[in-house]
Each structure stands twice: as structure tokens, then as C-alpha cells.
Image (cartoon, rainbow, N blue to C red):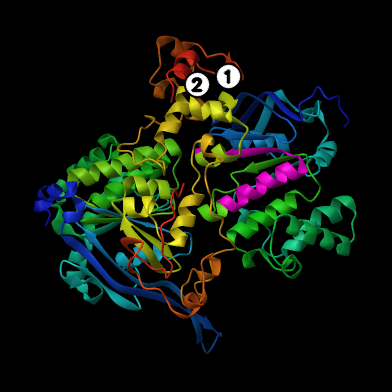
Amino acid sequence: MATNYVSSAAAQHHPRHGEVLLDVQGLVKHFPINQGVVFKRRVGAVQAVDGVNFQLRRGETLGVVGESGCGKSTLARLLMRLETPTRGKAILEGRDIYSLNGSELRRLRRNVQMVMQDPYTSLNPRMTVGDIIGEPFEIHPDAAPRGDRRRRVQELLEVVGLNPEHINRYPHQFSGGQRQRIGIARALALRPQIIVCDEPVSALDVSIQAQVINLLEGLQAEFGLSYIFIAHDLSVVRHIADRVAVMYLGKIVEVGTETEIYERPTHPYTQALLSAVPVPDPRARNHREIIRLEGDVPSPANPPSGCHFRTRCWKAQDICATQEPKLTPRQADPHPVACHFAELRHPVR
Amino acid sequence: MSAPAKHHLLEVKDLFVEFRSRDGVTKVINGVSYHLDPGETLAVLGESGSGKSVTAQAIMGILDMPPAAIPSGQILYNGVDLLTLSEEKRREVRGKEISMIFQDALSALNPVFPVGWQIGEVLRKREGKSRAEARKRAIELMDLVKIPASKQRVGDYPHQFSGGMRQRVMIAMSLAQDPKVLIADEPTTALDVTVQAQIMDLLGDLRRDLNMGLILITHDLGVVADVADRIAVMYAGRIIEEAPVFDIYEAPAHPYTKGLLASIPRLDMRGQELATIKGLPPNLAKIPPGCPFHPRCPYAQPICREVVPAKHVLGPRYSACHFAQEVVTSGN
């Protein structure tokens, strides 16, 4: 697995034609809400992720966007197997990652690594950078022979654009952007096929954000990585993603290529989301038609019946309350969307 | 505080702020000047550590002194220098004349008191209003910031509100005494885009309806483009460029602004590689000599390492760059 690393890079120029690496089927995660001190009764469930299906191909970037509370981060944690799903499968190399245990699981885990959001809290302040990046080798000793590790860590530092001589420094000696690079180096250490990036740039300043995005894109081209790129910033996702999934209250409401989602969105929520993104150009001020959504995202513990978005949707009809729209291709545009009244709305900006 | 019309509503003049600690002196603000008129929106743009929030805290008089110190400079409100006033006098300005909202509404609100109580607190404490009067006014204020069902929700606690609603509570609180200047420090950074649009709209409407001066502190070039009249860009405790909003997006006159504009991914453009500003913002304890931006600047010449650039005035705008004219004519 580690040796075919470079050859896999060939696929990345046509990401859509790459083989399917990860196949997520009907993933559901409900967190129980308990009441009572001595006798705990289950009184409900937070339906954080509620039936998510998608495929990730080799060398592609799948962007996952949505507002806070839509289940993006729970999805990331599920894919890392930091949470056990209530239902559903995620098939990697022909095997369901939730059915594995012990050494098999450990082997599979190498293939999926994660870059966290906050570079200030995701690095242990008492470990040197060398120890942090080398820690995966402690858990997977066969990935690098003991004597070779220091050199490997230095290589990784160089790959992410840090000075290899800084191997003995501590995280506090680095700036936010540099720390995020350390987090990326750690994720790269075991040469994974998939990296789950959970809001990797949202804590960074604009000028630094661009550096990290460019780094992620460069690494993808170099190593043929697949990314699941979770973010709330739609502009960043458009920049980096090949395909985009839009989530709302635990469900994917629309999924398609970057062009389909950004140029021809058919779900009202996607349209509203896109129209609300500020454009850094004052000349656009009076030419933009912003769809203003009323109210807030409903609680995932008690989502609306039928279509989850209907309470904030201007197109809602009776059918939306009774029948949940399926995520399938609709007449308006061939990409899958979960809306009874999907239609194109021209110039979204 | 009656003043002749000549004065700006608020004017910061050549302000210096430093933090004195055992490790030495960190110069956080190095000669910042800007002004604000009624009904105007000034955006102060900068990355973390550029001094944008510290300037605001100096205006509000909420800097911890020590460790902070203001060695020189003036903050004129209607022509009166706030820095020379006694703490008692400043308290009268704070809230009543100049008010502020903060980035993180959840930590700015007290979790153990109902929101109505917190909105009305200033009225009870400062204006001697009774509980009932304060509560009534709190409901009015909640209506003003468009919190639905204000009568029912006045007794709710902050955790019962969503992020956007909490920010509205903060805004209501800051408006309780009808301030003339509202300073909003990253008011939408913690919010989702759809909610962000609602809050920015609200701030814009309030500014217009109440004819307030609004200082909007942000790092987001997108948010600013929609609402600001003028933009001041800060770097290493200085304003390096100030310009009317259209001019700055059309043709930035400082290489830093130019780099910032080029480095943001845009929704309406699918770029390949993002332009970046190389290097890191300077350590404020050792700001480089000459122009503080020179180590990262593509235009840098020997002169930039030695001479701090003066303000180059170009019509309605200025830029603190030796090559301002060249930068501005090179376009965006």
C-alpha cells in the first residue's frame, strides 16, 4: 500500500474516473438524549447524521458544506471511526470499516487520516513537533523502522513547507498556519489514501489560509490523495473541491460536481446558502439577489416531518410536510437533489 | 457635549498603544488615525494581531492598563479628547455615546441571567429606571433587533437562543442608551453565512435608521464590501491604507491590500492556485525597521528597509507605501 503511492497520482487528473475508494451507505448516527439520574430513560435522540450516502473516488476532493449543527463534523468523526454509527456502512477496500476489530481495524485506519480544525488545541503542547508527527509510527511500527523515523519526520516537515531543523521545537513556537502544517504532516505520516479535513483553514488568517489551501492542493497532486473537505466557507470549498455535498440537518440535500452545485443548484437551501456568501466586490452590492432565510436551523433532536428544510423554505407545500423528498436526479438538472420542487434559479449571484 | 459642526463625530489621532510586560515592550498600535461621521460605516480590516481590536478597546476605554499604556495620541469624540477625561466622565460616554458589540455573543452574555434582565441592566443602573420600565424597554429593543416573540422570550436565558439570536441580544444591549457610535468587533465571524447576512442587514438598517456611526472591525473582505463606506486596512499596528470602498477593491494602493484581495478564494471565480502573501505577520515585539511589510512585499526596494513610508495621499485616499502610485496604477 505504501509502495504504490506515487503511481496512484496518475488518476488525479481525471478525478471522476478514479476508482471508488470509499463507499458510504445509509450512515446514521443518533445520539441518545437521556433523562433521570438513577433510572436513565431515553427520551429522544439527536439525529446528527440521518442517512448519508456518497462515494469518494481516488484523487478527488469531496467538499461537504452546511451550517453549524448540520452534522458535518459528526460525519467526519464517523468516517474516522471515532464514533460508531447507529446504522449504515462505510466500505473501504471492500470491507465495512465498522465491522472490523483489532489488528485489521488498525491496518485499515492507516488509510484514513484527519486534519483538525483548530491548530491550537489539536497539538499536544508538551510534545515536540518531531514526536507529534512521529507518533503515528509508534502506533504503526511497521510503517517506518525505528532508526528511520527521524529522517521520515524531517522529510514530512519539508513536504509541508516547514524547516526540517525545527524538529525539536514545541507547538507554541509556531504560528497558526505553521501549526496547521504540522497537523497536515502528521496526517500524511502513514501515507493515507484519504484525508478527512474538518474545517482545516477556518481558524487561519486570510493570507495564511491561501497558503494552506495551496499546500493541500499540491499534496493531492503529488500523492494522489482523496480529500473529504468539510467547511462552512463555500468559497473555499469551491476552490478546492471536485464534487460537493450540501448537508442540512443530518442529510445530504444536494450533491454534484463543483460546477453543478455552484452554477446550477436546484435545491432552495443551496441557492439560499450561495446567495448569502459575501462577494468581495462592492460593485456587486446592488446586483446580487440575496435569498434571506427566515429563522434558524431547527433542532436536530426534533426535526420537522417530511423535508427537513420546509420550515424555512419559500417553496414549501403540503407534500413537503408529509413526504420526505429522496436524493435522486430530478428534471431540472441531472445531479441528485432532495427537493420536490427542484428547479434552476438563474444567476444565483 | 455640544460641539460645532466642524468636528468629526469620532476621531482617533496618532494613537500609540503598547503593552509593557516583563519581557519588554510590545508596540501594538503605532500611530493610528481615523475618523468617523454620523451615519457612516468605517470598516477596519486586518489580520489577527494587526491592532484593530486594541484600537477599538482604546476608544471604549476598556483596555487593561497596565499592562497596556497609551504613551501618546488623542481620541476625540465631538472634539473632546476622551483620554484626558476622568474615569467617571468616561463612563458617561461609554454605552451612552459609544457602544460596542463583541465577537462571541455566548461568552459576552452572562449565562445565569435572563436576556431581558441583561439588556435592561444598564437602564436600571445608569438611568435609574425601575425593573418594570427596564423590562418594557428591553422588549422594545428586542423588537428593534427583530427577535421574534420578544414578549415571551424576554425571560429566556442565553443558552436558549441560537447564535444569531444571541448576537441580536448583544446588539439590543449595546443600543439600550441610543449610542451615536457603535463599534462592532467581528460581529459575524462566529456565525453561519445565512445568519451572517441577517446580522449584517440588521446592522446596516440600524445605522441608517438611528443615524449612528458604525465601526466594523473584521478580517473578512467579503463582508466589508457590502456595507462599508470607507475601509482602513491595518498591519502591524498601523493603518497602511485608507480609501473609499469602491476605490480599494478597484485598485488597492498598498501591496498588502493587493495581496489580501488576491489571496481570497471567491465564489464567483474558480481559480487555480491562490496567490499568497509569503511569510508571516511580524512579531510586534520586534517590528522590522522601515516599512513593517517589507519582508513580505513583492515591491520592496532598499528604501523600504530603512525609511518608514509616509502617507501618500491620492485624492480621497491614502497609502503608506513608498510606491503607492505604482501599486495603484498596476490595478488589481
Q: Amino acid at mark 1?
A: Tyr
Under circle 1, the secondary element is strand
* Residue at the image point whose x is 52% and y is 14% from the top: B308
* Highlighted magenta segment, given as a residue range: B197-221
Determine whether label 1 and label 2 are within 8 Å by CB. yes
Which of the two residues, B193 or B283, is positioned nearer the viewer here? Answer: B193
Q: Is residue B106 visible?
A: yes
Residue A181 colored magenta?
no
The picture places residue A208, in percent across and down from the top left corner, at 40, 37
Task: Report the disc number at residue B253.
Answer: 2
Q: Is residue A331 left or right of residue A4?
A: right
Relative to B15, is B101 above or below? below
> Reading the chain from its start, which is encountered first: label 1 or label 2?
2
Task: Report the disc number at residue B318.
Answer: 1
Chain name for mark 1: B
Q: Is residue A123 visible?
A: no
Q: Is residue A167 left or right of residue B2?
A: left
Q: Is residue B154 left or right of residue A306?
A: right
Indicate the quadrant containing the N terminus of chain B: top left, top right, bottom left or bottom right.
Answer: top right
Relative to A63, is B263 above or below? above
For label 2, count other residues whose C-alpha is less than 10 Å away and answer few (under 14), some (14-19) or many (20+). many
Task: Report the disc number at residue B112.
Answer: none
Residue B220 colored magenta?
yes
* Residue at the image point whose x is 37% and y is 62% from the top: A254
Chain name for mark 2: B
- Magenta stretch, overall SS: helix
The number of callouts visible is 2
The picture places residue B179, in percent across and down from the top left corner, at 78, 43
Relative to B5, is B143 above or below? below
Q: Alpha-carbon distance for marks 1 and 2?
A: 8 Å
Which of the two residues, B68 or B249, is positioned nearer the viewer here? Answer: B249
The picture places residue B81, in percent across and down from the top left corner, at 79, 27
